[in-house]
Image (cartoon, grey):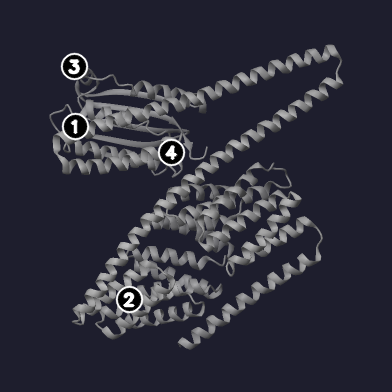
Amino acid sequence: MRLLVIVVILFLNVNNLIAQDRIIDSLQNKLDSTENYLEKAKLYNAISQQYKYSDPHKMLQFALKALNLAEKEQLKIQMGNAYLNMGTAHIILGDYQKAMDHFVWGKSIFEELPKTPQTSVEVAQGIAKTYGSMGIVFSEQSNYAKALQYYLYAARAYEKLENKGQAAKIYNNIGVVYKSQSQNQKALQYFLKALHIQQELKAANAGITQTNIANIYFKNGQLDKAFQYYTAAKNSLDKYPNTRALGEWYNNIGAYYHTRKYPEMALENWQNAIAAFSEINDKFGLADTYLLLAEFYNHQNNNTKALQAANNALNLAKETDVMEQMGEAERLLSDIYYQTGNPNQALIHFKKYSTTKDSLNKKNDVRKAIEAAMNYEFEKRELLQKEANQKRELLIKEEAKSNNLKLLFGALIALLLFGIGFLIYNRHQLKKTLTLQKELAEYEQKALHLQMNPHFVFNCLGSISSFIVQNGTDSAIKYLSKFSKLMRLTLEYSKESLIPIDKEIESLQNYLELEQLRFNDKFGFSITKDPNIEDDVALPPLLIQPFIENAIIHGVIPKKENGTISIAFSVTNSSLHCTIVDNGVGIHQSQKNKKDLVLAHKSMALGIIKKRLEMIAEATTKETNIEIEEMKKDEEIIGTKIKLQLPLQYIGN
């Protein structure tokens, strides 16, 4: 049976390679026979893409040829496509810094191109592909927030182009990002969305998506549902062969049968996985399979086979230098030797496991530091690129205006020239005035935002000092840990005019947990978000927190009993609403308490927020509003309600 599987897999791989070689030969023949530079550049890029799954070095080589020719002949679209191919090759080669550099260069080219009827589709496709590729880099770096941001850009771009096939790939990538964050329900939503399109288009990669869906159901314990999608995935992989995907499928279905307590079927599928991975020399996949076998044999108390499988996994992991697999293999060897009554060998392998785990942690720390530096450099380059584009656009506009004026001066008589020149001058001054007013409003908004940061930090530091005095060093350390997480979120988005609503909720959650610690759980809280609010809905940072701070300090804390605070986000038409309710002492009593405090400082937060809302209303031409209401029941004060209305805005707008 195993020999038959190997023969079939070998036959399919040979067929795939032959088909790819035929396409490349056909493109090469066209390249040799054409003298048109545009066609040559297109063919170089097409050949580069054909090497995507087989030889990244050749992919890079042909993309460079396309770039050199496109630069020489000023073929902008092909220049952009060449940069994208080079970036993709660098992703495959594992050089994410170079990959991101090439994507940024390609993005700047596509964004500068004018969208004429002849080129608008190609330019839009280039921009969409750039966003998707940048999302892949961020995802590989575990920067999931940025990855989602660029994947959502790409998805919208492909939806506008009605390119369902590419949109489905992006949906699948979004599902992978959510799965990596253990958000299985959101991951499942996007996998199903991708699969629906793939089945409609009869796409070759439907089997991979079906396997992803099956794995989610398997992880959630919905075994019947998982088996349904595993079966569908196998049918798709039989129809559209993909050896690596087939090997992963065998590993997953083996784990499924092991859970179902069908050991023979589990072993049969894992042996099939070994055959599949062996044919393409996929040592990473083989190591995963042997780890599964070692775990299986260890539970069966078959120590000889367990040791053999674990050693196979360890040797493969050493060849590929995958520390996660090395650590898992050492752990299994330690467990097996301990069960066989060999404590010396068990201790040796446990020490190696501990050493590998420590090395992996250090490696991850270094990787995170490098990724942070790369992200900083990326944002810096992107900002510089935007500034350069703005200057270039300004120069082009000024040159065009100058040429128009020269033609006008040469065509009209002196009196007419004087009159028209006067009108043009007035119009130019009005435009300049309006531009300055708009820029002034933007700078005022940024200045007010910057005022909020020190106000927020001052209040947090005051809370920390108070907590240290009241609760001692150990509790203060816990408080400072939460504060550092909150400050990291605050600093990350302090330079942004808008942040995703989920990040704002995360920041508020951290702040409220800090205050709970500080006041010994004197109050409880809840934060709810309407399901109709999309993931990329955004709002200005540090706008909600001061209201919550007032609700805590001046509302629920003065109460003798424990208090509650609830925060709810909802949408209606074109507005985002935030409602904050506390069951504190009420507005009038809190104002009286403030007057009674001798050392009370003057809070600027409400004044700053009102000014910020005015700026937001001017910038978006949409309504903003604050309503503060003291709640009563039978003339008894039961708390305060704050309703905040904001324009509905999205990340990237």
* Residue at numbered disc 1: 466
* Residue at numbered disc 3: 598
The label nearer to you, 3 versus 4, is: 3
Viewer-proximal residue among 424 and 3: 424
Q: Earlier in the sequence, mark 2 or mark 4?
A: 2
Residue pictured at 46% horizontal, 81% vertical: 275
Q: Earlier in the sequence, mark 2 or mark 3?
A: 2
* Residue at numbered disc 4: 499
Label 3 secondary element: loop
Give left or right: position of 71 versus 454: right
Give left or right: position of 20 versus 353: right
On screen, residue 387 above or below 641: below
Residue at mark 2 to residue at mark 3: CA–CA distance: 71 Å
Residue at mark 4 to residue at mark 1: CA–CA distance: 30 Å
Q: Quadrant of residue 323?
A: bottom left
Specify the amino acid type for callout 4. Answer: Ile
Label 2 secondary element: helix
The label nearer to you, 4 versus 1, is: 1
Residue pictured at 62% horizontal, 54% vertical: 83
Please state the horizontal and vertical placement of residue 154, each as a whole percent of the image.
55, 50
The label nearer to you, 2 versus 4, is: 4
Q: Are marks 3 and 4 in contact (CB under 8 Å)?
A: no
The label nearer to you, 2 versus 1, is: 1
